Image (cartoon, rainbow, N blue to C red):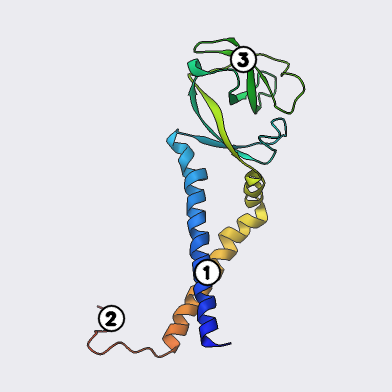
Amino acid sequence: MAPVLIGALRRGARLAGMAAMALSVLALLVLGLGPHTGRYRTATVLSGSMRPAITEGSVVLVTPLPATELRQGHVIMYRIPTQDRRVVAHRVVEVVEGGERPVVRTQGDANPQPDAWTARLEGETLWQVRGALPNLGFALQALRSPLVRTLSVGVVPVVLALLWLAEIWRSAGTGAQPEPGVPSAAVGS
């Protein structure tokens, strides 16, 4: 291949690598560290009860909502008052009792009937769904698989280290000499 083409491919690969690194850092900040600020949380939706607005496999962003500001129409995440106490994201269809510990009736948008219970919401702060990223939950679930974990912890660092060493050896093998008047690094000082 022509040296120009090889150089362009290397620059393209380097730019793609930097873009992947930037996206990885952004994902770490938004999904891993951001929720620790208390300004928002993320959660993966496991069912289709809120279709079409929120599909299964979506990651939802929820923000704090003072209990006294809860209104009909809000989509909230809460623990259902049944034996399994799972967390769901459903729309408030009725505020039965307002105040600091409201009682609500909810319904999934895709469900034909409201939920069979009324729920007393505990705590001063509720979590209101503000947005959803479709299918991101499936990607996060795949990233948690044992194979991906092994590759990311064991294989990828070794491959990167070998690539960096190859780059060092390649530049050392070209016999690059320091420019005149520029001191070379002192060894053992």
Say whether residue 24 is left or right of residue 189: right
The reply to whether the C-beta atoms of the residues labelled 2 and 1 are less than 8 Å apart is no
Which quarter of the figure is the N terminus placed in? bottom right
Q: CA distance from mark 3 to mark 1?
A: 53 Å
**Rendered position, 62 above or below 70:** below
Q: Earlier in the sequence, mark 3 or mark 1?
A: 3
3 vs 1, front mark = 3
Which quarter of the figure is the C terminus placed in? bottom left
The reply to whether the C-beta atoms of the residues labelled 3 and 1 are less than 8 Å apart is no
* Location of residue 56 in the rendering, given as x and y in whole percent from the top left corner: 70, 38
Question: Badge 2, how many Cα within 10 Å: few under 14, some, many 20+?
Answer: few
Question: Badge 1, how many Cα within 10 Å: few under 14, some, many 20+?
Answer: few
Quick one: SS at disc 1? helix
Q: Amino acid at mark 1?
A: Leu
Q: Residue at the right extreme?
A: 112
Q: Which residue is mark 2?
A: 185
- Total residue callouts: 3
**Rendered position, 174 above or below 54:** below
Say whether residue 113 is left or right of residue 96: right
* Location of residue 67 in the rendering, given as x and y in whole percent from the top left corner: 50, 18
Between 149 and 45, the residue placed more toward the observer is 45
Q: Amino acid at mark 3?
A: Val
Q: CA distance from mark 2 to mark 1?
A: 26 Å
Say whether residue 125 is left or right of residue 45: left
Question: Badge 3, how many Cα within 10 Å: few under 14, some, many 20+?
Answer: many
Q: Residue at x 45, y 33 (%)?
A: 38
Quick one: SS at disc 2? loop
Q: Which residue is mark 1?
A: 160
Q: Earlier in the sequence, mark 3 or mark 2?
A: 3
Q: Residue at x 40, y 91 (%)?
A: 175
Q: Earlier in the sequence, mark 2 or mark 1?
A: 1
Q: Which residue is mark 3?
A: 104
